[in-house]
Image (cartoon, rainbow, N blue to C red):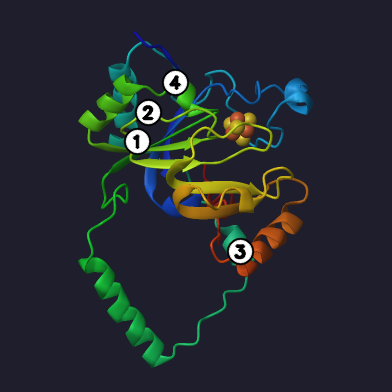
């Protein structure tokens, strides 16, 4: 029988990558294989830029769960009874909004294109209002197993995973996001989106372009050089259109 160690479980909007803006229950597992989560170990860790508190199990909804059923039930309760955090939107107010030039021919073309999109089958993992759980961490693939995947599917959840790619993913994941880390061997080399924190010396975007992913995102490194790193990522995407920019919109909104 599995025992799952969970830092926190909460309902919010996905803030990053291709699923940005989608309502989701976040299941944050405790523990990672690339850093202990303790500040005194950061300088010697494989991954040193982590911005997430995943140590212990002391967050809202966190704890030990003795069975997959018990953990799936706790996740379902968050979906049934969401408590969205208050939005802090002052960040938006400080920024001037630039309106697009409403050229009627452009707008008509866009409307036709949107209609075409609606007639296409919705791709796997794209939602359509379905329940969505994002398994993250820490490193979720240290703990996510077939029993939990089955229990979540039985409750109607699509399962998203955000992994550092050092562990091969089990079957049954509906949306797999891999975020490679410099200095760590990449074992999971396919999925739905590859989201590379940029810049990372030793993990250049070109090294990942040939892998089997549907989307390729660069996400600016958060930290003391965030502004410069954002400009660098922006510039890279302009010069290499294979890559799209992913911003951490949850931080702009002040939601978890
Ligand atoms: S791999 Fe992810 S969770 Fe682990 S230390 Fe790095 S950024 Fe944090």
* Residue under the point 72% across and 52% down: 226
Q: Residues under labels 4 and 1: Cα distance?
A: 14 Å
Task: Give SS at disc 3.
Answer: helix
Q: Residue furthest top?
A: 1
Q: Is mark 3 within 8 Å of ligand 1?
A: no
Give the label, 2 or 1, closer to the camera: 2
Q: Position of residue 82 (x, y in %)?
A: 35, 38
* Quadrant of the rendered image containing residue 247: bottom right
Question: Could you say which is closer to the camera, residue 226 or residue 166?
Answer: 166
Give the label, 2 or 4, closer to the camera: 2
Q: Residue furthest front?
A: 210
- The N terminus lies in quadrant: top left
Q: Which mark is residue 253?
A: none
Q: Is mark 4 within 8 Å of ligand 1?
A: no
Q: Which mark is residue 173?
A: 1
Residue for badge 4: 143
Q: Is residue 231 left or right of residue 210?
A: right
Q: Position of residue 88 (x, y in %)?
A: 55, 52
Residue for badge 3: 237
* Residue under the point 50% across and 87% down: 101
* Camera sees residue 14: no
* Residue under the point 52% across and 32% down: 187
Q: Residues under labels 1 and 3: Cα distance?
A: 28 Å
Residue for badge 2: 170
* Camera sees residue 199: yes
Disc 3 packing (10 Å; few <14; some 14–19; many ≥20): some
């Amino acid at each position: 029988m599995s025992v799952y160690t969970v830092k926190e479980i909460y309902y919010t909007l996905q803030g990053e990558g291709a699923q940005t803006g989608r309502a989701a229950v976040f299941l944050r597992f405790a523990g990672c294989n690339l850093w202990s989560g303790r500040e005194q170990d950061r300088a010697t860790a494989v991954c040193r830029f982590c911005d997430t508190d995943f140590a212990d199990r002391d967050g809202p909804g966190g704890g030990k769960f003795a069975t997959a059923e018990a953990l799936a039930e706790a996740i379902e309760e968050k979906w049934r009874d969401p408590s969205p955090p208050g939005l802090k939107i002052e960040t938006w107010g400080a920024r001037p909004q630039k309106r697009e030039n409403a050229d009627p021919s452009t707008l008509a073309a866009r409307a036709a294109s949107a209609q075409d999109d609606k007639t296409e089958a919705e791709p796997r993992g794209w939602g359509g209002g379905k329940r969505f759980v994002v398994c993250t961490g820490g490193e979720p693939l240290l703990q996510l197993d077939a029993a939990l995947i089955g229990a979540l599917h039985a409750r109607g959840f699509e399962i998203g995973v955000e992994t550092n790619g050092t562990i091969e993913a089990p079957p049954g994941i509906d949306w797999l996001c891999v975020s490679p880390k410099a200095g760590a061997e990449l074992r999971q080399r396919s999925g739905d989106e590859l989201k590379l924190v940029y810049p990372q010396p030793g993990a250049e975007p070109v090294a990942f372009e040939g892998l089997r992913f549907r989307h390729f995102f660069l996400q600016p490194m958060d930290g003391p050089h965030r502004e410069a790193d954002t400009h660098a990522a922006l510039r890279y995407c302009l010069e290499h259109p294979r890559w799209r920019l992913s911003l951490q919109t949850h931080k702009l909104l002040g939601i978890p």
